[in-house]
Amino acid sequence: MAMVTEIATLEEKYIELCKKHGTVPNTSILSAFFEAEDKKSRNERCVMNLLVDRVMYDDYHPLLELCNEFNASEVEGIDLSVRSSCSLEDQYVLSLIRSVNQKLGVVDVHDCFGTSFWRDVFSQGLSCQVLNVRSLHFRKLNIVGEFSQLRTLVLDSNRVTGFGEGCFSCMPNLTCLSMCDTVVSDLWTASAALLKLPSLEVLQFQIWICCSESSSTPLKPQSSDENTFHESKEADFSGVFQQMDPEEDDLESHMELNAEEIMREKVRKGKMLDQTNDVGLKYISSKASPICSKKHYRIYMINSLPKLKVLDNLAIRKSDRDRATETYSENFEHLPYRRKNKESVVKVLERRERRSSRWKSQSSYTRSLCAARMGSSAWPLLHSIPFGRFQDESRSLSPRQFEYHPLDPSLMVYGTLDGEVVVLNHESGKILRYIPSHGAQSSILGLCWLKTCPSMVIAGSANGSLKLYDIQKRHPHLIQRPLTPLLLTSVHVNSTDKLFLASGYSKDVALYDIGSGTRLQVFADMHQEHINVVKFSNHSPSVFATSSFDKDVKLWDLRQEPSQPCYTASSTKGNVMVCFSPDDRYLLASAVDNEAALTVDGRVHLNFDIVPTGSSMNYTRSYYMNGNDYIISGSCDESMVR
């Protein structure tokens, strides 16, 4: 049986190593030995806490050799802390951490290290049981290394906004994760990343604190496994995961899972939630990440993570899960079109080849194919498009506006801030046509492909100039300017490719003949403020819609000499975007700060009730997907689309 080195012998060896390297023993390391001996005398778990930020260059080599001796000693665990700026270079600190190996307990660090240090840690992994990282400046977290011993991960007060596709894939034993006071905001990708943690039981994006009217007292910490939460004086994380006992405080009366409206308004402001049954008790949300303010946040997490036992220090009961399942099914789709079971794309294609009787129409097949493809990954498939230098190697292209081709899904056109027009195959990355700016440079602000002449596209510039390009020919056809001076906002072609409309920072809309390039008419004072977008319908060549910051969306018909709109639909804020549904039955209007609604004959058919941010600069745009069933919406102040 191998001899186990005692702590006193280990300390003597450290002093000898210091003499060997000609340096004085580090007082913080000697203190760690003293504390370990003290714990041993009291029959406590023998853990040494090494303060790496107090280790100088002269201390490095003796300490590194000492770390190699820990595995054969009676020391049960080594906790490493970096609480302030460290004098050692990154690679020295990393080698110390790795040299401890299997007895590594807690690693408590803040971001005083460079990017390469964290990339190495996150890609290679560590053998620690508890990892606490503060002040991390990574936006996208992608921890893919081997962390097989990790039980607790604390990532509070970091600038993390989201997760990489492989994040958390090698943490089979992680039971507790805290990400309070981060910038994580997306429910879908967050839950997809967390599903890779098979042992996760405790999760925190915020801390609920129970208090009386006279004082604020945090909830009692839950009892913790000694192996998971080390109770050393320098690195105690047991208070991070605090759990409300459901028998002690009945939260159901004042914090219903579907009462998200109250939580959204108050969680970020730190306001207290009244408890109706317990007089004098209130609850305060502390260190909440933005994800906590998302609609149905709690029920989404409970339903998505079936093994979770505690969320935001509130225990999850059976009644919570039952209610979460019901509320989730009312507000979210697991698969498109309420499909219960996911099908493979191959099987859908096979049934189409056999002309299965299950599909009565083309739309039925399309829906099955969409349902099969949806949810295959929570992360988009990304690849770069050549928006870089072209021809003139000293200058880069700066895209401003782009439009996909209506018939060929591989083609797109984009206009640049310098007035250039570029046509490319975005699947192959090959630029098919580059059209330089002629004359004074002016940003491209409007683009629209023709439908019956698929090689032609209209481009409108900020200075009001309009040009019709045939991508198969060399020179564009210059169309008469709509109004002078005019800062253009949009252009759109009708369904027959005979007419197009142009709007700008004015209350007027100009109508053009595409064949001759002449302006046919100017419709004056269509709105009270400038017009953001003008759109022709998809099937009727004379019907079009306008949206304006005057809070109105209006439908017009050229056959009625548009002095009066067919109808007007109003929003509570300025309208940014309007478009027709593919079948022209509805108008989809989107206004500032996530106000989006469907309207039919002037009446609101469906309001999407997206949570506002409170910003008057949060410009929202909404579009139909390839069909009448789904809508996509995004806003400039948020890092997601819905």
Image: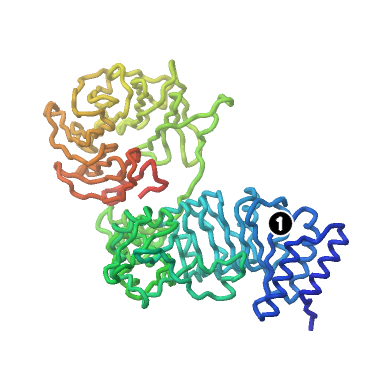
Please give the name of the residue rendered at 70% of the width and 78% of the height, measured from the top-left corner.
Answer: 40
* Amino acid on which the number 1 mark rests in the picture: Arg
Furthest-bottom residue in this view: 1
Please give the name of the residue rendered at 39% of the width and 72% of the height, measured from the top-left corner.
Answer: 316
Decide if residue 18 is on the left or right side of residue 70. Answer: right
Residue 167, position in %: x, y?
53, 58
The image shows a total of numbered marks equal to 1
User: What secondary structure is marked by label 1?
Assistant: helix
Observer able to see residue 102: no
Observer able to see residue 166: yes
Q: Which residue is mark 1?
A: 54
Decide if residue 16 is on the left or right side of residue 272. Answer: right
Residue 341, position in %: x, y?
35, 66
Quadrant housing residue 491:
top left
Say which quadrant the N terminus sits in: bottom right
Judging from the image, the colouring scheme is rainbow
**Counting other residues with Cα less than 10 Å from the Cα at mark 1, is it few (<14), some (14-19), or many (20 or more)?**
many
Q: Up-down: is 338 above or below 495?
A: below
Residue 639, position in %: x, y?
42, 46
Quadrant housing residue 6:
bottom right
Q: Up-down: is 551 above or below 253?
A: above
Quadrant housing residue 466:
top left
Please give the name of the residue rendered at 27% of the width and 45% of the height, measured from the top-left corner.
Answer: 595
Residue 626, position in %: x, y?
32, 46
Please give the name of the residue rendered at 43% of the width and 24% of the height, measured from the top-left corner.
Answer: 419
Front position in the image: 577 or 316? 316
Front position in the image: 487 or 359? 487
Q: Up-down: is 179 above or below 473?
A: below
Furthest-front residue in this view: 214
